[in-house]
Image (cartoon, rainbow, N blue to C red):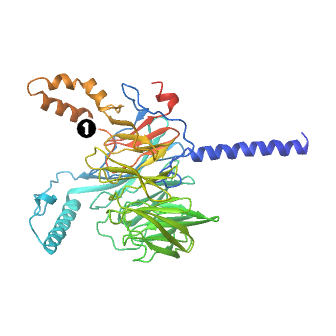
Amino acid sequence: MSRSMFVVALALIVGSALSGCAARASAEWNQWRGPQRDGVAVDSPPLVAALPPSGLAPVWTSAKIPSAWTGGWGSPVVADGKVFLHVHSRARREGAAEPERKYPWLEPDERPDWSEERFAEYESHRRDEDEAIGKSVYSFRETLVAIDAATGETAYECGNDSLYTRFLQSATPAVVDGRVYLLGAAYTVRCLRAADGEQLWERRVPGEFRDEPRMASIAVVDGVAIVQAGRLFGLDAARGDVLWEGDAERTAGAHSSPVVWTSGGRRLVIANSSSGHTVCLEPRTGGVLWSVETGAELSTPVVAGDRLITFGNSRKKGLRSFRLTVSGAIPEWTYNGLADKGSSPVVVGGHVFAQGARRLACVDLATGEERWATDIARRNPQFTSLIAADGKIFYTSEGLLMFAASGEGFRPLVDARADENGVLATEEAHRRRLGLDEIEQRDGGSQQAAKLWQEKVERHGPLECASAAFVDGRLIVRLEDGIACWDLREAVAGGA
């Protein structure tokens, strides 16, 4: 082979390899809200526009995994052929029993006509009591669960004893360069090898810890792990050394995750703070470039090109857009039609789609004008974030709601629930399978039908507050008792 032919052949080989790497990178959901942390799955194959009449069975469901009050609310991520989930579990100690509470949780309509000071005093006592009971009655453990993304079989589990938190620690893992980064209880950051779960380092970041859960997902930027644990920290991603500590006021936060903005080849970090300000900083030094009042505290900011989208937890704070520059963020518009405690929006095709307070809305990205808004039938729609693929938006709270990513009006494509076998189907299909219409015609049939619906459908399906992952046409969702994977590719599900 001549030298010129060798060079050409080598270029083809390298080009093919790089293309393969790019394809693999795009076919991952390796961190909170996907590869770009914006909720959008790129290069998705064509997806179904409707489910088969009898429903869609999962490709696989995992072994049992505790969730919610026994295992937390973290979301799954997908990388290196595995699904990863961080579980903070609690188990009752042998022989231990919960005492009768002097300060139980009171629903708003159960609370006496107390002053703010009186209620704050009650809540302080309740927190003390919860902590005492939690530490004496329960033991806590943190586990990284790795599942084969093709089969659903457990690849490995690795864990360590953990501590009590008021709500179980539910930060979503980030998998970068073959390493899994986790934020655990007591502001403890862990780095594990993705292939087998071997712990590479552990670091407790500075700060007083009592019982606070921190749900923010770590972002890894230019070799720095950006951690939101009461305030922002930068850790050396390779060794875990603390490189910098953010200002206790300017970078204070709880559950909102940092995102990355690239400007002129320069990668910068953007994060919401608990003061309602959003900051932009240098990942290597932690130096704050600017801070702007956005009203956003809990949801994750979204970067769309040189626009920043934030979502506040009240209508007054609203959905907001800012034009990004290195020297500051310039306000563009505010939309006050929605509010949420933590659900993050998604930007597709020149529109912003957001969910809040049992409503969905579509807003023009350039102007902030409402294109449409609609109510949704959900009991407790909060925290679960929207994701997008193939011109479709997915909302996985209580079931699967899939609608067109269009500004021309709300166009639902799928509104389905999962049954005890994981089959996604419309309410009509589930009712037909269970024979509920016939049961309801009998004496006392309404109660019997309601009980059967609850046992076979209501108790199953996506976990409230967790958000879905999407990889190569497959929707991966944390359930009440595990993880399920549905193949939504048109070529597969469309022919089911």
Q: Residues within 10 Å of mark 1 (few under 14, many from 20)?
A: some
- Front in this rendered view, residue 53 or 25: 53
For this rendering, which residue is in front, 402 or 242? 402
Foreground residue among 217 and 324: 324
Q: In the picture shown, does residue 285 fall above or below 364?
A: below
Residue behind mark 1: 458
Residue 283 x, y percent position in the rendering: 55, 69
125 left or right of 162 in image: left
Which residue does the image show at 39% across and 43% down from the upper left? 410
**For residue 476, above or below residue 109:** above
Give whichever of 475, 231 is nearer the camera.
475
At x 52% / y 62%, what residue is drawn?
Answer: 307
Q: Quadrant of the N terminus?
A: top right
Q: Quadrant of the C terminus?
A: top left
At label 1, the amino acid type is Glu
The residue at 37%/38% (across/down) is 63
